[in-house]
Amino acid sequence: MNEFVPVPDLLVTHSGSFHADELFSTVVLRRLYPGARLLRSRDPAEITPASDRIIYDVGRDYRPEAAIFDHHQRPAPLRPDGRPYSSFGLIWRHFGAAYLAALGVPEADIAAVQEAVDASFVLPIDLMDNGALSPSASGPLLSELMLPVLLESLRPPFDADGPVAEDACFVTAMEVARMLLEAQVARGAEKRRAETAVRAAIAATGAGRVLELPRGMPYHGVLTRSGADHILFVINPREKDWSLRGISLVEDGFELRADLPAAWAGLIDADLEAACGVAGAKFCHNGRFIAVAASREAIYRMAELAVAEAEARGL
């Protein structure tokens, strides 16, 4: 937390139309300082640094020691790589670790989760707020679904007069922003927990070609970073059966290290059992990236067959 205003009375941002950056900044600060009053203002007296307040996205100054975090002034604050901050990036830089601790992220994971959320969530909002990234870059079908655009759609209509409507809509949008940011943090913390489990499974697998996980969990990134390129498939139990999955060559990509056998594609139950010769085989996706069997024994037998075919192709 900010050492210069350990317990502020006021969280001050600008009035009028709101944007994603001060919404998310407010989410972070309200979690850390639930007793502080939110003040949306452009009054010079209220947006001037003082010992009782944190000011953000207004004031045309960035001085952490004075608890003011704006990015509209010249020169604007820049990240080490030269890309611009918005108020959200500044608040995340200085308060993100405390926010993650307040959400219960283990201390050992805070730095990694803070960096991951910054790269995947905070930075795009910073860039869009500064005009360095346009919603149109996503294409005409998706531009209106970009997160900052969706949050700004919660503003009041142009002919709703007075600050009451603006403030009420700000509170509504802030609640949406809160849920989204907390979900991002939960996802980042989840990936850290999964990484520990996946690395242990990789070590147990040794030179084997099939990785068994204790349950479904994110694994692609860990496999790539671990250098375990010899592993071709992943199995894990589900609620009532077991799954066998291929491994993407790149995270979030579609091309696999090895496909499941072409003869299994799109088959279910008896037809799949006949095609692979494994009792308990239940399903293989037409895309050949996942298959399902009724038991661990059956899924391992399917995995062995898939590995044998892949090795016959030189993989």
Image (spheres, rainbow, N blue to C red):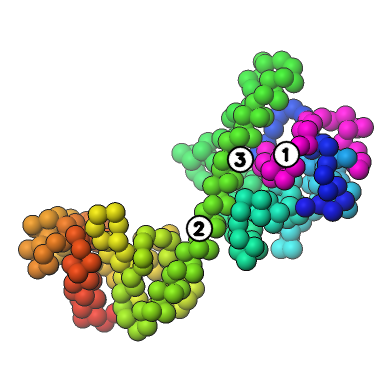
Judging by the rendered image, the residue that carries numbered circle 2 is: 190
Q: Find residue 34 and name its label.
A: 1
Q: Taking 7 as reference, is 222 above or below it?
A: below
Judging by the rendered image, the residue that carries numbered circle 3 is: 178
- SS class, disc 3: helix
- The quadrant of the rendering that contains the C terminus is bottom left
Q: Sequence order check: which comes first, mark 3 or mark 2?
A: 3
Q: Sequence order check: which comes first, mark 2 or mark 1?
A: 1
Q: Taking 139 as reference, is 194 above or below it?
A: below
What residue appears at the point 58 percent right and 36 percent down from the top-left corner? 176
What residue type is disc 3 on? Arg
What residue appears at the point 81 percent right and 47 percent down from the top-left corner? 69
Span of residues in magenta: 22-51
What residue type is disc 2 on? Glu
- SS class, disc 2: helix
Query: Is residue 224 visible to the viewer in this orientation of the structure?
Result: no
State the residue in front, 82 or 69: 69
| Magenta region includes residue 58 | no
What residue type is disc 1 on? Pro
CA gap between label 2 and label 1 equals: 26 Å
134 left or right of 256 in image:
right
